[in-house]
Image (tube, rainbow, N blue to C red):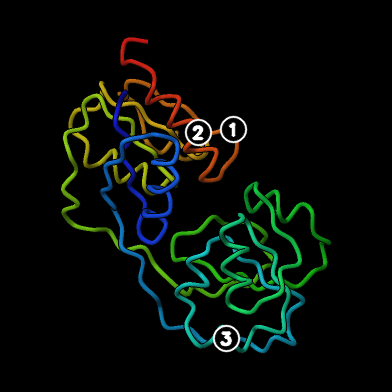
Amino acid sequence: MRQLLLLRPEPGLSESADRARQLGLEVISCPLFLVEPIEWQASDPADYDALLLTSANAVRHGGPQLKLLRPLPVHAVGGATAESAREAGFAVASAGEGNVVDMLAGLPRNVRLLHLAGEDHRQAGEQIERRIVYRSAEIENPRLPPLAELVAAVHSPRAARRLAQLADHRDRTALAAISSAAAQAAGDGWERIEVADHPNDSSLLALAAMLCHTSPSQ
């Protein structure tokens, strides 16, 4: 069985590693980024109908300003994001397992949303106001292990691009990508690239498990 390389930053890294081990996989952890908060100022909640959260990191790193926005219901992308919002005292109005485009398609067009986002985020909904509350800073020397025979899981297009920059030899490395955008960002030259059925950690790890049980020649 091939080993699984996980690249996402903490605390998601440990959460994914635990899930992967529950699937019987042998995990190598090597985060490529360090998530850190950015100073920001909360808006008047009366100016909005709801919060849009697309990552649990917005809650984890939002700081004391989040308290001012608790009167607003939350539309969350992903179960982990929704759970983090609930733990922080927010009422979750909806939670979707697709992407932000899918989430917005299910909301009224005139809803006034405040998106608490990371510095590297997907642009969706031109009328949405955003506050950048965290960033993922590159780890200069992440000390990648030798990639030959490994399966690497990439949780974002940015992680895929960063891995491609660092990987000198990739033709014996299989990639499990969380989305088509992440797969495209990884570029060419890999042994194979497969895309998860759904853009979430559980689906990505299920794909990674399949690849880990597949020999390089298959």
Give percent across and percent down for residue 18: 40, 48
In this view of the protein, which residue sits in the foreground, 164 or 83? Answer: 83
Which residue is at a point 50% across and 33% down the rendered structure image?
Answer: 206
Nearer the N terminus, badge 1 or badge 3? 3
Mark 2 packing: few (<14 Cα in 10 Å), some, or many (20+)?
some
Find disc 3 in the rendering and name its residue.
42
Which residue is at a point 45% across and 75% down the rendered structure image?
Answer: 61
In this rendering, the answer to whether 6 lies above or below 180 is below
Which residue is at a point 64% across and 84% down the rendered structure image?
Answer: 69
Three-letter code, disc 1: Asp
Q: Nearer the viewer, mark 2 or mark 3?
A: 2
Give percent across and percent down for residue 122: 54, 55
Find disc 2 in the rendering and name its residue.
206
**Disc 2, SS:** helix
In this rendering, the answer to whether 177 lies above or below 70 is above
In this rendering, the answer to whether 158 lies above or below 193 is below
Nearer the N terminus, badge 1 or badge 2? 1
Q: Considering the image in quadrants, where does the C terminus appear?
A: top left
Mark 3 packing: few (<14 Cα in 10 Å), some, or many (20+)?
some
Q: Nearer the viewer, mark 1 or mark 3?
A: 1
Q: Which circle marks residue 197 in the picture?
A: 1
Give percent across and percent down for residue 190: 32, 24
Q: Considering the image in quadrants, where does the N terminus appear?
A: top left
Mark 1 packing: few (<14 Cα in 10 Å), some, or many (20+)?
some
Q: Nearer the viewer, mark 1 or mark 2?
A: 2
Report if the CB atoms under discs 1 and 2 are less than 8 Å apart: yes
